[in-house]
């Protein structure tokens, strides 16, 4: 098979008309003319033949065609004789071997495989480093909130809803119901907790409280920010603190006329 020369073009095995003319004892010009005529008559054949050129020994550029397996079969099907049949078989075998090489990737050299493994490892390391940086950023964002909650647990600045309710002259049950009605909190496992839209506002902290027999339950306490939020909600809904109620009544008494003045007016 060493005397057969095939090329590759666009992922296909091809052979030149120049070689076919030499192997089959044909005039190259006649082959060129035959292909021109047939492709002009049937445009579907253009996919089998590719017009190109070569340089002869006189350094002159001349035309030739490169053809794939189908083009080769189409061109030589009319060639007869024992020698022609032998060359046909040789070329069919050469096309088979070339196409097998084109469709079967060669094993990678160990150096290339090692290089790819290193590149993959570097990619994994880079992604892990990026993930680590991202986690550090997220932890940095969460740290202030965690420290704030911790400080609330250690300070006396948090109040129970009972303590806040006393400021408005109502029971804890009444205030809890109002906060529930306004969509601020809900009851989960016998504990009042903020709804999702308020859960990350830092309004509350949850503190374990002993209830006897060595058991504990979570108790919700409101931070300074949470207390201010409740006070605003109460004011927005027309509720005043006990102090504000007393001040309002005192103000109302000031604007009333004195008893003597009322009698004189009558």
Image (tube, rainbow, N blue to C red):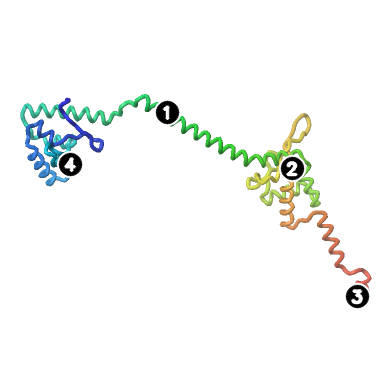
Which residue shows up at 76% across the image and 35% down it?
A: 209
Q: Earlier in the sequence, mark 1 or mark 3?
A: 1
> Mark 2 highlights which residue?
221
Q: Which residue is mark 3?
A: 265
Give the CA separation, mark 3 to mark 2.
55 Å
- The answer to whether 259 is drawn above or below residue 228 in the figure is below
Label 4 CA crowd tier, 10 Å (few <14, some 14–19, many 20+): few
Q: CA distance from mark 1 to mark 4?
A: 42 Å
Q: Secondary structure at mark 3?
A: helix
Q: Secondary structure at mark 4?
A: strand
From this viewpoint, is residue 163 visible?
yes
Q: Which of disc 4 and disc 2 is earlier in sequence?
A: 4
Q: Which of these two is toward me, 47 or 223? A: 47
Give the Cα separation between the discs numbered 1 and 3: 104 Å
Disc number lying in front (2 or 4): 4
Helix, strand, or loop for circle 1? helix
- Tell me the mark number nearer the camera, choosing from 1 and 2: 1
Q: Quadrant of residue 49?
A: top left
Q: Quadrant of the C terminus?
A: bottom right
- Figure label count: 4
Spatial distance from mark 3 to mark 4, Cα to Cα?
A: 124 Å
Q: Residues within 10 Å of mark 1 (few under 14, many from 20)?
A: few
Q: Residue furthest bottom?
A: 265
Q: Against 206, is 105 above or below? A: above
Tell me which residue sits at (63%, 47%) in the image. 197
Which sits earlier in the primary sequence, circle 1 or circle 4? 4
Q: Where residue 206 sits: x, y (%)? A: 71, 39
Quadrant of image for the N terminus: top left
Q: Which residue is mark 1?
A: 117
Q: CA distance from mark 1 to mark 2?
A: 56 Å
Residue at the spot of label 4: 52
């Amino acid at each position: 098979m060493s005397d057969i020369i095939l090329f590759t073009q666009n992922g296909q095995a091809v052979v030149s008309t120049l070689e076919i003319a030499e192997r089959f004892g044909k005039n190259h010009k006649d082959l060129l003319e035959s292909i021109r005529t047939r492709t002009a008559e049937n445009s579907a054949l253009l996919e089998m033949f590719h017009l190109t050129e070569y340089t002869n020994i006189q350094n002159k550029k001349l035309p030739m065609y490169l053809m794939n397996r189908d083009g080769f079969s189409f061109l030589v099907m009319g060639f007869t004789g024992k020698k022609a049949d032998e060359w046909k078989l040789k070329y069919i075998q050469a096309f088979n071997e070339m196409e097998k090489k084109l469709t079967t990737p060669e094993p990678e050299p160990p150096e290339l495989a090692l290089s790819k493994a290193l590149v993959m490892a570097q990619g994994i390391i880079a992604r892990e480093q990026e993930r680590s940086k991202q986690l550090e950023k997220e932890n940095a964002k969460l740290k202030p909130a965690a420290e704030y909650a911790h400080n609330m647990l250690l300070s006396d600045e948090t109040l129970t809803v009972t303590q806040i309710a006393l400021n408005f002259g109502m029971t804890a049950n009444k205030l809890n119901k109002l906060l529930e009605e306004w969509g601020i909190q809900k009851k989960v496992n016998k504990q009042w907790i903020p709804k999702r839209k308020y859960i990350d506002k830092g309004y509350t902290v949850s503190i374990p409280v002993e209830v006897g027999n060595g058991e504990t339950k979570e108790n919700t306490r409101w931070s300074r920010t949470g207390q201010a939020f409740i006070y605003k909600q109460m004011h927005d809904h027309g509720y005043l603190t006990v102090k504000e109620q007393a001040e309002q009544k005192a103000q109302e008494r000031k604007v009333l006329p004195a008893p003597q003045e009322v009698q004189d007016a009558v």
